[in-house]
Image (cartoon, rainbow, N blue to C red):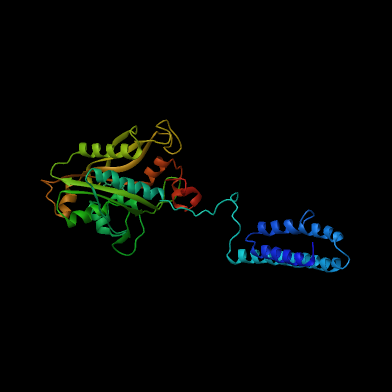
């Protein structure tokens, strides 16, 4: 190959090097021209066939080709790497783990509250609300629990000054609702409650209840049992059993407590139900006529039932959580298992 041809070939090679869009292109150009079986060794071999006058010039041009092309290939490679760095992108590697954006989930307590709202709204209940910082009057006195009443002992709480406290139960929402409207009333009131309780596997100083209140002209304990059983089956599954036991609350007469059969062991007995097969869910009863009188309802023509259930208890059996503290640790590794 003569000198002029070699120069032409060099221009072509340099052009190919500059147009390389990827590292693989650069390598392909190198192999094509510079590898052992490439174009350049062929030119070198061909020098022998040239005349003595042509050979030195052709040899010089061939050397130029090698030097300039090597440099052009290096430049192309560096430029590609710089561009990659500048755009912050690595070459796509489908074998690397993807970038994971953690999806939020609703807390188990929120899930239970939202499910309860869904279920009770099927029965015509709406959602009512009350303050966490309550008056002593709404939390106790209006609920037929005067200062000397022994049931206040089990509901010691955080007092914020005379007559003001963190509510120990959601029952004061009953009073607030009845103070502000006439019967019929059909509400549930989910919310936080506070007690001076020592924390253990089933107690927390800060917990949630869902209060329910149904007031009309003719409401009976049978309505309470029917509605609670409907709720239990919707919340826990059709095979859950509900058990009502006599109890005492100052603001209901008669009063009951009710239990759900333990969903974790299906009633056989486990740590969650303390081997009894049952889990206490709620207090309930027929609204005491004294409470109606306090809020200005006529106790002669008004009847109602009320309940206040523990949200954490329901979450624990629904999700099989053995310790109430897990619900308050804010450990995402725990919380992301639910929902
Ligand atoms: N507030 C009660 C408690 O925390 C539970 C309760 C009992 C609520 C009877 C009620 C009720 O509405 O009628 O122990």
Q: Nearer the viewer, residue 251 or 83?
A: 83
Instruction: Look at the picture and state if 225 lies above or below 182.
Output: above
Above or below, comparing residue 249 to residue 264 in the picture: below
The percent position of residue 151, horizontal first and vertical second, equals: 30, 49
Task: Judge whether residue 17 can be spotted in this image.
Answer: yes
Q: Is residue 73 left or right of residue 93?
A: right
Quarter of the C terminus within the rendering: top left
Can you give x and y, in whole percent of width and height, for residue 80 in the image? 64, 64
Q: For the N terminus, which image quadrant? A: bottom right
Residue in front for this viewpoint, 206 or 10: 10
Q: Which corner quadrant of the image does residue 217 belong to?
A: top left
Q: Nearer the viewer, residue 52 or 40?
A: 52
Looking at the image, how many numbered discs can be counted on the residues?
Answer: 0
Residue lying at the far right of the rendered structure: 52
Residue 209 rendering spot, x and y as whole percentages: 33, 49
- Give the residue drawn at x 26%, y 43%: 284
**In x, y percent, where is residue 157?**
35, 56
The residue at the point 22 percent across, 54 percent down is 175
Q: Could you tell me if residue 246 is visible in this image?
A: no
Left or right: 63 in relation to 289: right
Q: Quadrant of residue 268?
A: top left
């Amino acid at each position: 190959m003569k000198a002029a041809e070699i120069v032409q070939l060099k221009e072509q090679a340099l052009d190919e090097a500059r147009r390389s869009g990827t590292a693989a292109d650069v390598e392909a150009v190198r192999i094509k021209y510079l590898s052992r079986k490439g174009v350049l060794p062929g030119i070198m071999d061909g020098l022998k066939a040239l005349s003595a006058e042509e050979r030195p010039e052709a040899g010089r041009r061939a050397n130029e080709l090698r030097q300039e092309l090597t440099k052009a290939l290096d430049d192309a490679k560096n430029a590609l790497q710089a561009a990659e760095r500048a755009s912050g992108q690595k070459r796509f590697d489908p074998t690397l783990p993807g970038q994971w954006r953690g999806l939020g989930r609703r807390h188990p307590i929120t899930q239970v509250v939202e499910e309860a709202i869904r279920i009770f709204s099927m029965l015509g209940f709406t959602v009512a609300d009350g303050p966490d910082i309550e008056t002593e009057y709404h939390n106790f006195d209006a609920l037929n629990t005067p200062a000397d009443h022994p049931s206040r002992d089990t509901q010691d709480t955080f007092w914020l000054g005379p007559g003001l406290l963190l509510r120990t139960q959601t029952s004061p929402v009953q009073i607030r609702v009845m103070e502000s409207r006439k019967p019929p009333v059909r509400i549930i009131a989910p919310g936080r409650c506070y007690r001076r309780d020592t924390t253990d596997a089933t107690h927390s100083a800060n917990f949630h209840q869902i209060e329910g209140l149904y007031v009309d002209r003719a409401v009976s304990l049978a309505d309470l049992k029917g509605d609670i059983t409907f709720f239990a089956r919707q919340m826990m599954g059709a095979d859950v059993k509900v058990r009502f036991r006599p109890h005492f609350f100052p603001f209901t007469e008669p009063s009951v407590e009710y239990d759900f059969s333990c969903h974790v062991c299906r009633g056989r007995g486990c740590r969650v139900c303390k081997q009894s097969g049952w889990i206490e869910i709620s207090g309930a009863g027929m609204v005491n006529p004294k409470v109606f009188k306090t809020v200005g309802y006529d106790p002669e023509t008004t009847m109602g039932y009320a309940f206040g259930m523990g949200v954490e208890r329901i979450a624990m059996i629904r999700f099989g959580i053995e310790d109430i503290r897990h619900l308050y640790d804010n450990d995402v590794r725990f919380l992301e298992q639910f929902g």
